[in-house]
Amino acid sequence: MITNSKIKRLYDFITNTEYGDSEYWYIIGNIDVLKIFKDFDSDDIANLGSEVLKWNSEQIEILVECFIYGFKDEITFSKQSYFLTFLLANLKDESERLDILENASDVILKGEPKPIELLNSIINWIEVNEHNKMPYYNIQCSRIYEARKLSTEYNIIKQKISELRQEISSLTISFQAFDEIDGLSDKAINIIKRFTKEDFEQLKLDLILWDDKELEILAKVFSKGDSNGNLLDDNYFYGYLFVLLPASTARVLLDDMFYFFENQDIAFELLLQIKSKLNELIAKRYIERTTYEYWVKEITEKQKNCVDT
């Protein structure tokens, strides 16, 4: 008996319509299925993984077809992509798995990075059955290998970010002494120096999960430099932190903004965001009018030679 109401709704919809024209699922049915699936959270998806393995082949085929050919939005698509990966890794029926490999490998490659354990399981199945040696499945198998490569790279990036956050979190304990003790930020700086452009892009996405104190310490790490006085020469990310932090903390970053502002070109969009933050600071009276006018002038000059990204 299905106890999850969302899964039951999905199951009932499929079973009540499963004997209809197959084109229905390709043209219209997938839209209705995705309307239901859109509301699934991670727990619902995990429960669906347990339940779907009990479904009959026709019901699984319908779900697979809807997930391959249906599209509602990017968030739902990522969930579809993940679940097709799950099915390819866990279904027992060879024909069902080959159907997913043949028709869904491009969907699996897209979306959020997939769990390595699922991709390893799929690749093990591919190689044991030598599907990778069959010309017919060559492109499909190469996409699965590419998906594993991307997921491996993603995990490495996430590990770097986790290492950085652990160090930043430890520094929040010494927050009061941060500006007084030389070398306190050296370890964090050495971690950041290993970051690539891709690492920073992922860090930007992850920072919404950091608390304000962690963000402030991260900004201080950028502006304080190491024990030899070497700054992290990255005005883009410092500017991004200025935009992200609450106004009460962002105003402090202005003291060191000069060092970063003059170093490199800054994207036009980021300049607009910095100006918007300045508008917030002046409106809340965190900065004087002279300070505001100075930075607006600097932004205007910077915009003349800004980069488009």
Image (cartoon, rainbow, N blue to C red):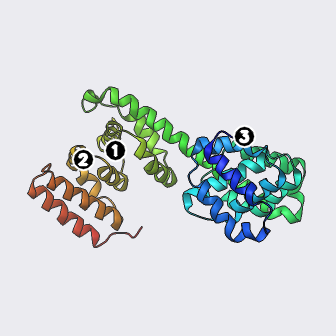
Q: Looking at the rendering, which quadrant does residue 28 occupy?
A: bottom right
State the image coordinates of residue 151 (x, y, percent, origin top left): 64, 49
Among numbered discs 3 and 2, the one appearing first in the sequence: 3
Q: Looking at the rendering, which quadrant does residue 260 occupy?
A: bottom left
Q: Distance between the Cα atoms at labels 1 and 3?
A: 46 Å
Residue drawn at x 89%, y 58% as measured from the top left: 133
Q: Amino acid at mark 1?
A: Phe
Q: Which of the pair 247/303 is nearer the observer?
A: 247
Q: Which residue is mark 1?
A: 222
Q: Quadrant of the C terminus?
A: bottom left
Q: Amino acid at mark 3?
A: Ser
Residue drawn at x 36%, y 47% as measured from the top left: 232
**Within 10 angstroms of label 2, few (less than 14), some, or many (20 or more) residues?**
many
Residue drawn at x 55%, y 39% as measured from the top left: 159
Q: Secondary structure at mark 1?
A: helix
Residue drawn at x 71%, y 51% as measured from the top left: 85
Q: Amino acid at mark 2?
A: Leu
Q: Secondary structure at mark 2?
A: helix
State the image coordinates of residue 200 (x, y, percent, origin top left): 46, 51
Q: Which residue is mark 2?
A: 253
**Within 10 angstroms of label 1, few (less than 14), some, or many (20 or more) residues?**
many
Q: Which residue is mark 3?
A: 50
In the picture shown, does residue 223 fall above or below 133? above
Q: Distance between the Cα atoms at labels 2 and 1?
A: 10 Å
Q: Is residue 111 something that shows in the picture?
A: no
Q: Circles 3 and 2: CB distance less than 8 Å?
A: no
Mark toward the viewer: 3 or 2? 3
